[in-house]
Amino acid sequence: MTKRVAEPRLFAEPQAARAPAPTTTLADVVFDRPIDQVYTYSVPADLSVRPGVRVSLPFGRGDKIDTGYVVNVHGVRPPREVKSIVRVLDNTPLITEELLKLTRWVADYYLCGWGQALQAVLPAGVRDQAGTRNIAFVEAVAKEQLPNPLPELTPKQAVVLEHARRIDGPVEQSHLARAAKCTTAIIGVLVEKGYLRRDKRRVEREPNADDHAMTEEVSQPITMNAEQQTAWTQIEEALRTGGFHPFLVHGVTASGKTELYLRAIEEVIRHGKQAVVLVPEISLTPQTIARFKGRCGQVAVLHSNLSDAERGAQWRAVAAGQVQVIVGARSAVFAPCSRLGLVVVDEEHENTFKQETTPRYHGRDVAVMRARLEGVPVLLGSATPSLESWHNAQKGHYGLLSLTSRVLDRPLPPVHLIDLRHERPAGAISPPLEKAMRQTLAAGAQVMLLLNRRGFNTTVHCPNCGYVAPCDYCDISLTFHRQRQALVCHYCGFEKAPMTTCPICQRDAMKYFGLGTEKLHNELSEKFPGYEIRRMDSDTMSKPGSHAKVLDDFRAGKVHVLMGTQMIAKGLDFPNVTLVGVVNADIALHIPDFRAGERTFQLLAQVAGRAGRGPRGGKVLIQTYAPEHPGISYAVKHDYLGFVSQEMPQRELHQYPPYQRLARLIVRSEKMEQAAEFAERLAGAFRLGEQPGVRVLGPAECPVHKLNGYYRYHFQLQSTGSTALHHVLKTVLATVRPPSSVEFQTDVDAYAMM
Ligand code: ADP
Ligand code: ZN
């Protein structure tokens, strides 16, 4: 039995869209393609279209029927013959006028098709008008039921299969496709090869379905401290006068930043308007959600674990004005609210706001642009602001609101370094860290341990000939995962069986070393018997709800030690945690990326912020081989300003952001020479078209030269301003075409450098 949930019919049948015959109308339409071009069509007299609706129309040489987005309606007939729209797909525009403007900007700035930007904005569940319907589910076939012999898999198929296996039980096909970033065709192949089972199920729509309906905290009214009060006065003023007012809220961990957001949101709601709040995906914990729900009326939460139907329902509720606050990760910046009053970006320095597929937008930067287009205040908050935002605040583009101390005069925890060059621990945990853990646990308090590397051993090598086991498809050494009994590539997902014999010198001598979270977990279980130790990383947290479960258990005191990757570092608030340990602070320090120091500083400052949030206080111990590195030494002192004042001159010297704009161009091909050649040619074209204020660096092999079977080359454009940069990009890219075996991507304001 399926149940149909009665809902207002926001999307009537297409036929209902017919209106009394108007005069000749023309519509400008864009398509989900990597071309930034608008096509004009005529609108038959019996159809009515508005900007923001989708239409069916003939496209291309064969006049195949395709779907396009109407972006403009007018009466100016172009000089050539125009084709006609065949059908109108949406009765009500799915895209508001504001979102049309915003996506236009995204296409211009991040250099993609307007249609691609629109496609990315609109959740699949809305495009499909997902409601009660048949949905394809797939499930990994149990190992013992697999066909014999096992059919071969391509790396991409192996990745998809890996994703499916990590999910326990059936999953929506489209959900898997999204999670594994693949087409449903690949899933189809896996079904054919017998690795996946597929069946259709009828799914009912649950509007506002919420997996963790927590009892909402009814919080006591808080009296703001002096710093909060000062900041609030400025925010309130901005809300009252209206218009675009960007603020950077720089407040140490637990200084009461969120309290400021909540007040601002309450104020906006009182005036009948809506607020959009962006948080990093991993901060979307039940605790965060409950906090917003407890204070802010109707809250829609947009996170990646929603099914298409749920996401569609949330989107429609927002569009219909039934929701006051939208809390979500990156893509929530495109929420279709028509009465926007405020935008908040928490942890604005987080790199996960940057999307690494087309359109390669940065959620924070789009948030600021949206606030500007719609004339509303925007709050960017962080304990460790990105240098970009800091620079904007220094130049006076953003108002700076500083909260320099924790609420209730709680001290920031003291941070001590453990110099591994002197300590040389036998395992992962040095004696001072072990001692501190024992004291903490004996006192009935809790411990968090950060190790930002998953797996058991990080390297598999032959001491005889020096061979290091690499991925078959990438220039990356494989990580041993003991539970899965596999060597895994952390870049493409390729897996193979662990080996004991060296494939080069044939000696039975392969050694496994290097420390990952799985091994750390083992060591802790041996050292601390009788204590409950839980690991949180993307291997243990792949099932929906597992994250919430561990955190609930930790809060309830059932777990004594919570260890894991950066997942544990962000935004969590556990008053009983009095010790935070960092097992190896140096992991991100030596990667070839000009932001390596900034990232290390941010991660350490964030994880240190998890300690001593309650009345019992707390401390932080950081193990490192590089205690003098500024990314570490300033984190020890909680000294953001100190870090910034030594890092900024470096950036200026090397003409890196925030002083310059940067675009990265990545060229790839399965054929190495062709990739190298085209990279040279493309960089050459940029050199020829070089403008004052723009320089070309490269090309060179990417730090990860081979990835997923592709050979990769890159170069950078650096420019004093985005106008010059975009001018050069647009002029040059219009003149070059890669050979058919070569692809390239343009990443404006690139964050990924590998
Ligand atoms: P941040 O966002 O900077 O980490 P929060 O706003 O989450 O800080 O505040 C940390 C904790 O302190 C929360 O539990 C919050 O309710 C509480 N809090 C915030 N401001 C005050 C205040 N002025 N007095 C007492 N408690 C406060
Ligand atoms: Zn690989």
Image (cartoon, grey):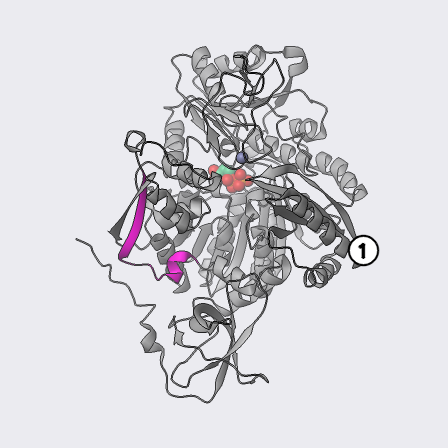
Q: Is residue 335 above or below residue 564?
A: below
Nearer the observer, 100 or 495: 495
Left or right of 316? Residue 453 is right
From the viewer's side, name the closer residue of 151 and 424: 151
Instruction: Give how far across and how far down residue 396 sits, in percent.
Output: 72, 54
User: Ligand 2 closer than 8 Å to the CB at disc 1?
Assistant: no
Q: Residue furthest left?
A: 1
Residue name at image x 60 percent, y 43 percent: 349
User: What's the residue at 35%, 57% (across, down)?
Assistant: 313
Percent across and percent down for residue 270 are 45, 60
Q: Write the residue at 38% across / 65% down.
A: 320
Q: Closest to the observer: 241 or 7?
A: 7
Q: Determine whether 579 is above or below 431 in the image.
A: below
| Residue 138 is inside the magenta segment | yes
- Within 10 Å of the Cα at label 1, are there few (<14), some (14-19), or many (20+) other Cα atoms? few
Element carrying mark 1: loop
* Res 616 visible: no
Asked whether, in this view, residue 663 is left or right of residue 176, the answer is: right
Question: Where's the C terminus, which quadrant?
Answer: top right
Percent coordinates x, y for residue 645 in the rendering: 75, 38
Q: Residue furthest right?
A: 692
- Please report the bounds of the magenta region as a residue range: 123-140
Q: Tell me which amino acid carries mark 1.
A: Gly
Q: Mark 1 sits on what residue?
A: 693
Q: Is residue 401 left or right of residue 177?
A: right
How far across and how far down the image is residue 411, in percent? Answer: 59, 29
Q: Magenta segment: does it hold 305? A: no
- In the image, residue 623 above or below residue 159: above
* Residue 522 visible in the picture: yes
Check the image and report above or below for 387 versus 720. above
Q: Is residue 571 left or right of residue 105?
A: left
Marks counted in the figure total 1
